[in-house]
Amino acid sequence: MRSEVLNIAAQRNMFLSPDALELVLSEPEPGTFISNILSSMTRNTMVIEKSDILGFLGGAVSKEIKPVTPRNKKQPDISVIAGTDVTGESMCEGKMEDFTRYFMSRYNTIRDILRRRMGTVMPIEKAVTVNREVQVIGMVSESTITKNGHRQLKLEDESGMCKAIIMKDSPHINDIIVNDEVIGVVGSRKDGGVLFATEIIRPGVPSEIWEESDSVSSVAFLSDIHVGSHTFLEKRWDNMVRWLKENAKKMDLDYIIIPGDVVDGIGIFPGQQEELSIDDIYFQYHRLAEYLKDIPDHIKMVLQPGNHDAVRPAEPQPALAEVFTRSFDSNVMLTANPVGLNIEGRTVLTYHGRSIDDWVASVQRLTYNDPIGIMKEMLERRHLAPMYGLKTALAPEKKDYLVIDKRPDIFVTGHVHGAGSIEHKGIRLIAASTWQDQTEYQRMHNFNPEPAVMPIVHLGTGKTTMKGF
């Protein structure tokens, strides 16, 4: 349109100043508008100024008129937080020294968080030799209930190991304590070097108010798409895409996070081949690429793997390889699982959520029906998957990428196909739903998903909306 306006003026041997041109282009029909102005010109001039146009409008256009800035033309403001993406950084070989380094990384990082809460702490080796109240920080290697109803913990730090007893009348007797978490213990030594705990301290997350920013953008979450399964909800997906095309720009929905299980995969569970509509893993990702291309181009998407995807099962999982993603558009950003993101000044922790299986199996009061309750337990321990040796395989990397070392503003998981949101200590916790109907495997286990729900968080205000399709 700019060229058309300039050509119309040039045909009459006239030119437009930059201010005049911007004012013309702000009109609904710039070509007709400039033609009318040129026909009405009474003074002999080669350059049309902004004042000429204002004069033509008879002063109806005030000095407050500003050039129109197209919406959603800004560059996406999103980046991976340094040190949170294992892609290209994996160096473990599964040797004993790898595991030692891995658990020491976990211990040291969470110990430093606990020290900021507890103050002076004592090495376990020394604590079991003094006759006064002490504070120690240790990794739980075992938690059992004695025949008298007390809880006995085995704690370990870099100096040694000890037993800690939580008496059955203690307010902490019913605390959820899982193996391999790092805790603080306040207590006194008794005979035999046993600590009798009076207080259990966890690293936790500080409670902070969501400070509103000037961001107008929103971020949405689409987890567990499961392309390739015959239970993929294509019609509901199409409804969601249609809604995005009609609403995303005007509501500044500029980002979508996809926390894993983007395809159904091959051989993930017994009898899966009977539930597949696409039985080739490469074709599953190719079809996914076609579905993602329907999403408006201005939306930046972040896609990470889950336990159904074509990456190693051990967490942290690196980003999908190019052999599977070469047909993806450039607005799809591939990351590891888990990963930390900075989106317009907000910290987003996104994790597929496989460890939820271990939480449910290990802690009787936690259930698949309340994934957000499990997410709270993760935050309290500052770790996404503390329990080693269960369903969630953990790779002994040079650092523990599943430690939550930075407090997030938004924390999202998928995996369990539930949908929900809550504000917890100022953090927006999101369970990101699914785009798959109930499978036979889920029906056998009496699991009912909540599909086709898209959580949306406004990055400025923190307001969360659950949009159902």
Image (cartoon, grey):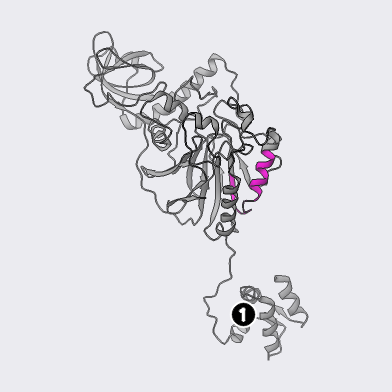
Most foreground residue, 159 or 234: 234
Q: Is residue 343 visible?
A: no
Picture residue at 67% right of the left edge, 38% below the top: 285
Residue type, numbered disc 1: Lys
User: In this image, 185 relative to 339: left or right?
Assistant: left
Q: Is residue 81 visible?
A: yes
Does residue 19 lie above or below 248 as drawn? below
Q: Which residue is mark 1?
A: 50
Does residue 169 lie above or below 347 as drawn? above
Task: Please provide percent x and percent y for residue 185.
Answer: 30, 23
Picture residue at 70% right of the left edge, 87% below the top: 39
User: In this image, 95 relative to 328: left or right?
Assistant: left
SS assignment at label 1: helix
Task: Please provide percent x and percent y for residue 217.
Answer: 51, 54
What stretch of residues is rendered in magenta?
A: 285-301
Q: Residue furthest top?
A: 192
Task: Please provide percent x and percent y for residue 189.
Answer: 25, 14
Q: Is residue 297 magenta?
A: yes
**Placement of the N terminus among the 4 image quadrants:** bottom right
Does residue 297 lie above or below 399 as drawn? below
Q: Is residue 385 magenta?
A: no
